[in-house]
Amino acid sequence: MSKYYYIATRLPDGKRGQGVYTLEEKNAVTFDPDVEVLFITDFTAKSKDEAREIAIDVWNMDAETVNADGEHLSWGEVYILGNSLEQLARRFGLLREFRENGIL
């Protein structure tokens, strides 16, 4: 499976943006001088606490946040986010906790 990155940004018009990107797309977004990166994760954590922080940060992004095309996350992006968070939960034995808290 390819590695994906979840990135939340502030777009030039002041709106918040978000998306799920491959490495090449991530580089294009993060090096764009007109875009302010607010949050980025590659879903890697070294502890349960870091895993919880990543999950909380991803799901606390404003529901009105849109992707780079000005649209809400696509179903494909939602699937990748969910799958990446599930893998993170499995790695640290947090599946039950993530499900109970509505993360998964």
Image: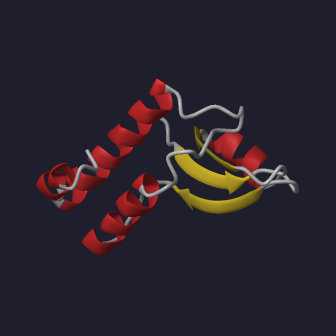
The residue that appears at 52% across and 53% down in the rendered structure is 62
Indicate the quadrant where residue 22 lies. top right
Q: Residue 102's x, y, as percent?
A: 24, 49
Indicate the quadrant where residue 93 lies. bottom left
Residue lying furthest left: 96
The residue that appears at 47% across and 26% down in the rendered structure is 76
Marks counted in the figure total 0
The residue that appears at 44% across and 58% down in the rendered structure is 60
Q: Residue 61's x, y, as percent?
A: 50, 55
Scheme of colours in the image: secondary structure
Q: Is residue 14 above or below residue 83?
A: below
Q: Is residue 94 above or below residue 104?
A: below
- Say which of 82 and 24 sits in front: 82
The residue that appears at 29% across and 46% down in the rendered structure is 87
Identify the image quadrant of the C terminus: top left
Residue lying furthest top: 75
Q: Residue 49's x, y, as percent?
A: 30, 74
Q: Residue 14's x, y, as percent?
A: 78, 54
Left or right relative to 33: residue 22: left
Residue 1 seen in render: no
Residue 37 seen in render: yes
- Say which of 92 and 79 sits in front: 79
Left or right relative to 25: residue 82: left
Left or right relative to 24: residue 104: left
Identify the image quadrant of the N terminus: top left
Left or right relative to 49: residue 33: right
